[in-house]
Amino acid sequence: MASPSNGSSAPVSEFLLICFPNYQSWQHWLSLPLSLLFLLAMGANATLLITIWLEASLHEPMYYLLSLLSLLDMVLCLTVIPKVLVIFWFDLRSISFSACFLQMFIMNSFLPMESCTFMVMAYDRYVAICHPLRYPSIINDQFVAKASGFIVARNALLTAPIPVLTARLRYCGKNVIENCICANLSVSRLSCDNFTLNRIYQFVAGWTLLGSDFILIFLSYTFILRAVLRFKAEGAAAKALSTCGSHFILILFFSTILLVVVLTNVARKRVPMDILILLNVLHHLIPPALNPIVYGVRTKEIKQGIQKLLHRRM
C-alpha cells in the first residue's frame, strides 16, 4: 500500500480512501447495517429480475423498464458498496488510479441513467392513462429497446468527460481522498492543476441531465392528473392513480434523497464532512434496496410472480 505523501512530486499511481476522517471508529458500527442493506439490495433486485424473466405474464414494456432500473441499481451498488465494506472490515484503503476513475465514471453516468429511466416510465404511465387505445402501438418491445439505448448512450456520452477531465489533471504528491468513494471533487482537490473547468462541466451536465428528466416527469404527471380528474366513472380515477402509485413513490424517494445530498453539499461548511460522506454512501445503497420492495409490495402481478417462483423452488 502506498503511503500518503504531501510533499513529493512523484506522480500518483494509486489513491487512499479515508472514510470518516474525524470519526473512523464509526466504521465498525456502520459495517453491519451497510452489509445488511447491501444483501437486501442485491437479493431483492435479483429476485425481481428472475421473476420478470421467468413469469410470462410480466413480459410487458412496463416490467422491462423496471428490469432496467433494477440492473442500474445493482451495478451502481456493486461499484460502490463492496469497496466501502472492504475498507471497513480489512482496512484496505488503496484503490488504483484506473479503478478510481472507472468508479467515478459509473457513479456519474448511472445516476442520470436512473433518472432517465424514471422519465421513460413516467411517459409509459402517461400513454397508458391518457391514450389507452394507442398504448399497444406506442409502448412496445421496440420502444423499450430504443428507450434503453437512448438512456445508456445519452448519459454515458455526456458524463464521460467528467472522469476524463479529472484523470488528465496532474497529481504530484497528495493521494489521500477524504471520502469512501472516488467522488469527482474529492479527487480533483488533490491535483496540482486548476480544476475549474471540471467543476463547471460536472455542474452543468448534472443539472442539465437531471433537470430535464424531472421537468418531463413533472409534465407527464401533470397531464396524467388532468386526465384522471376528467374521469366520470366511479372508481376510475382511483384505479388509474393506483397504477402510478409505485412509480411516483420511487421518484419521490429518489428525488428527496438526491435533494438532501445536494443541499448538504451546498451547506458543506455547516455540515460535518463525515455526514456528507455517509449521505453519499447511503445514496448509492438505500434506493437500490427499496425500489424492488416498493414495486413488489404494491404491484399485484409482481407479487403473484414472486409467489409462483417460491412455489417452484419448494
Image (cartoon, grey):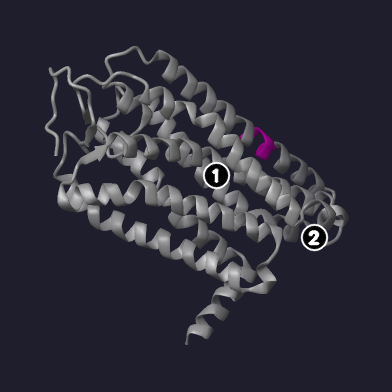
- Does residue 115 appear to the left or right of 189 in the view shown? right
Q: Where's residue 90, x and y in %?
A: 16, 51
Quadrant placement of the N terminus: top left
| Residue 147 x/y as whole percent | 68, 46
> To which quarter of the image does residue 302 belong?
bottom right
Sequence-wise first label, 2 or 1: 1
Q: Mark 1 points at which residue?
A: 114
Q: Give the mark toward the camera: 2 or 1.
A: 1
- Per the image, is 215 magenta? yes
- Check the image and report above or below for 58 versus 152: below
Mark number, residue 48: none
The three-letter amino acid code for the residue at tag 2 is Ala
**Amino acid bearing label 1:** Glu
Mark number displayed over residue 236: 2
Q: Give the range drawn in magenta.
A: 214-218
Magenta stretch, overall SS: helix
Dot 1: element: helix
Q: Residue at 61% of width from left, 49% of height from top?
A: 248
Q: In this view, does 151 lie to the left or right of 255?
A: right
In this rendered view, identify the residue nearer to me: 264 or 16: 16
Q: In which quarter of the image is residue 41?
A: bottom left
Task: Using the image, determine if residue 22 lies above or below residue 200.
Answer: below
